[in-house]
Image (cartoon, coloured by chain):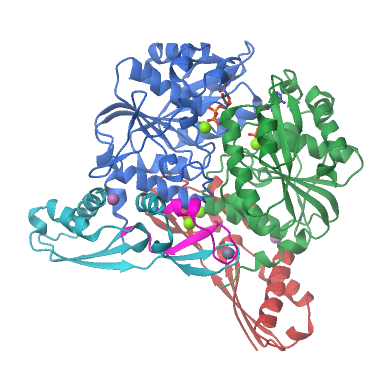
Chain colours: A blue, B green, C cyan, D red
Amino acid sequence: MIDPRLNIIDKRLAKIRKIIAVSSGKGGVGKSLIASTLALTLSRSGYQVGLLDLDFSSPSTHIILGVKGVYPREEKGIIPPVVHGLAYMSIIYYAGNRPSPLRGIDISNAIIELLAITQWGSLDFLVIDMPPGIGDATLDMIRLIKKIGFLVITTSSKVAFETVRKLIELLGSLKVPVIGVIENMKMTDSLFIRRNIESLDMPFLGGIEFDYKLEESIGNPNKLLETQFGRSLGWLASNRAEIRS
Amino acid sequence: MIDPRLNIIDKRLAKIRKIIAVSSGKGGVGKSLIASTLALTLSRSGYQVGLLDLDFSSPSTHIILGVKGVYPREEKGIIPPVVHGLAYMSIIYYAGNRPSPLRGIDISNAIIELLAITQWGSLDFLVIDMPPGIGDATLDMIRLIKKIGFLVITTSSKVAFETVRKLIELLGSLKVPVIGVIENMKMTDSLFIRRNIESLDMPFLGGIEFDYKLEESIGNPNKLLETQFGRSLGWLASNRAEIRS
Amino acid sequence: MHEWALAEAVVSTILKLAEEEGLKDVVGVKIKIGELQQIDREIFEFALSQFQSSSLRNAKFNFETVKAKFKCRVCSHQWNFEAENLEEDVSEAIHFIPEIAHSYMRCPKCESPDFEILAGRGVWLESITG
Amino acid sequence: MHEWALAEAVVSTILKLAEEEGLKDVVGVKIKIGELQQIDREIFEFALSQFQSSSLRNAKFNFETVKAKFKCRVCSHQWNFEAENLEEDVSEAIHFIPEIAHSYMRCPKCESPDFEILAGRGVWLESITG
Ligand SMILES: Nc1ncnc2c1ncn2[C@@H]1O[C@H](COP(=O)(O)OP(=O)(O)O)[C@@H](O)[C@H]1O
Ligand SMILES: Nc1ncnc2c1ncn2[C@@H]1O[C@H](COP(=O)(O)OP(=O)(O)O)[C@@H](O)[C@H]1O
Ligand SMILES: [Mg+2]
Ligand SMILES: [Mg+2]
Ligand SMILES: [Mg+2]
Ligand SMILES: [Mg+2]
Ligand code: NI
Ligand code: NI
Ligand SMILES: [Zn+2]
Ligand SMILES: [Zn+2]
């Protein structure tokens, strides 16, 4: 018995120039904020951009973007609705606001299903908001999407860095491209993270400061792009060739 | 074919008075800091306390506690070493500082193995540091440990609360006891979380302020207990009957 | 109509397998269709016919529907899928992503959402003959 | 010596099963032992004998070792377990928690740690007869 879905994924993603998995060993480091805002920022610069929320256990990008009342169209697959300029796909279209108590095997199956039936069309960028850790979703991205690159997020904390170190070590040993590392929610000028990342021979893309006003902008993309956080990320997206190239 | 491990777990936990799963829909809300510090605080008040790190993908409590150079003893099972007064168990004894790329099925199997072979002996409290979300580990705790109670952690953010709401809804619908909810890393006096938790008929235990000095104390239990964070949590542990009773 | 996307996956897989096995002409194809996903058979068969390829000219497709079965991980109770009991939008959500069942269904005996989908999930290529 | 903890689990399970099936006297017990965990058979059998119970007085235990087999989720390669190739502390870690294999072993063909343990994991009670 062969699972036919695995043979169509490459084709579904064929017309996407760059696939960016926003990932971390840890939760709460800002993956969802960065994935959403990066997608918005690239879209506002004139690129065709998709955003895929793969954190099925705790999807967040719909809250950050204030997504409401849209639903994919069914046409030779499913076509993601356009939300604030982004082709946007999330499990919330199907689970609504109910809990999704999924084990790893279910998460893996649901990911494969989504990849097999979603018609993204031509995109410059597909940004994927990953769940934390090195579990089913991360292993499936590595296994199923050959042209993926990982944008790794950490905070300045030793606790976060230790988990990020493990993720980077794994990706490195598997020769999976790491686009670079962003240090989010910086509160001091410490070089701890930067030094450690560079000593692992990974590109350190830069830091984003802790933004006390960020919370007020959640749900409002225009406001989000105007925050200090949004502008820092916009700067990184424009000035770090690793992200766009 | 029957898995005999499932029939011995109750016995292994029989002499533990209270089992507290420190949990959240989300990562990065302070579960590991709170689990570690709660265990320390209870231990310093004279209780017998165990701490079990179940975040196999990104274990953190060993970093928070500064655990080094200890290993379980093998004697009719495995006996957790005592670390800063706590019977302490973590996957790091076996995985070292290597990445653990485990899918859900492996996480579930490893959890069952640990529960079946660990000899905790008599404890007043077993504190469990959970991974984020509603995946294999959370479903296994609900399934395998009948007397478990969930201590749910959120931050003040809408993004965190939405995932915590789902966890609470799931636990409530399954009649799994929720010890209460703690709002961590508070930066304002907003009552948003408190009101929402109370409207879900769940006990709101209190808030813990964002502590700018916390990072310096990581790895040092004595310092940790002396921080503002440590003292707030100590206060909650002494004054909120739900935690001790 | 997302049946089209699944049909395309099936045809790609048949062609890949035929090449691997050195079959020039595929004459028989066995496909299993899980009940849970409630594939519209007519649309699915029509879509399959649209992806014509010379090596599939003479292929006869054989379909078997596999009943959906669940097993509770908490109380071990097993039960079958009953589409009639579901609201239409729930049924539609499961049509796209069967795992969504975990957000809407519970074990009829103990109410747990922690159940295994034992059978009846997805579309499978069972075999091809040439 | 953590074999003792596993033996205790096996005996509890036999007694529970015997009660469920109404067996007063268990005469035969079939146990499968996964190779991966490298159970010390002598200690394990000794431990089993220590958990005596009247209904197990006459029980004869039959043990079968199941070879450990892995399958890579990336390249589908299958391979067997070779304990000799592992350092002692790695072997010991796997002895306690077989899943730790994912931190130390890789697919010999493509280097992926994303493999399935197809067989040879854990201790299983296959059947009892009375
Ligand atoms: N640079 C920042 N400044 C202030 N708050 C931030 C920043 N980045 C993220 N946050 C906040 O941190 C929390 C976690 O962010 P989120 O994107 O949900 O993390 P993850 O997806 O990694 O779990 C959210 O409440 C978010 O608003
Ligand atoms: N009250 C607090 N004040 C300041 N920082 C905190 C507080 N609670 C937790 N942190 C920090 O937040 C980060 C996430 O905490 P952690 O316990 O690892 O979260 P989780 O286990 O939920 O992923 C860590 O860097 C930790 O030091
Ligand atoms: Mg997120
Ligand atoms: Mg943690
Ligand atoms: Mg399932
Ligand atoms: Mg495995
Ligand atoms: Ni359809
Ligand atoms: Ni042993
Ligand atoms: Zn049940
Ligand atoms: Zn391989």
Is residue A212 magenta-colored?
no
Q: Residue at x 7, y 59 (%)?
A: C57
> Ligand 8 sits in which quadrant?
bottom right
Nearest to the observer: residue B119 or residue A32:
A32
Is residue C18 something that shows in the picture?
yes
In the image: residue D17, left or right of residue A19 = right
Where residue A174 appears, x then y in whole percent? 43, 37
Q: Is residue B231 left or right of residue D14?
A: right
Which quarter of the picture shows residue B219? top right
Quadrant that contains the C terminus of chain C: bottom left
Question: Closest to the observer: C24 or B16?
Answer: B16
With respect to residue C67, does C52 lie above or below? Answer: above
Q: Residue C112 colored magenta?
A: yes
Count of numbered circles in the view: 0
Residue drawn at x 54%, y 45% is A99
Residue A239: x percent and y percent?
Answer: 40, 11
What segment is highlighted magenta in the picture?
A: C98-123
Q: Foreground: B141 or D5?
A: B141
Residue B127 is left or right of residue A55, and the answer is right
Q: Is residue B124 above or below residue D18?
A: above
Counting from the top left corner in percent of width and height, residue C125 is at 27, 61
Task: Where is residue C102? Give x, y as percent.
Answer: 49, 53
Q: Is residue B193 left or right of residue B88?
A: left
Res. D89 in view? no
Between B27 and B53, which is closer to the camera in this rendering? B27
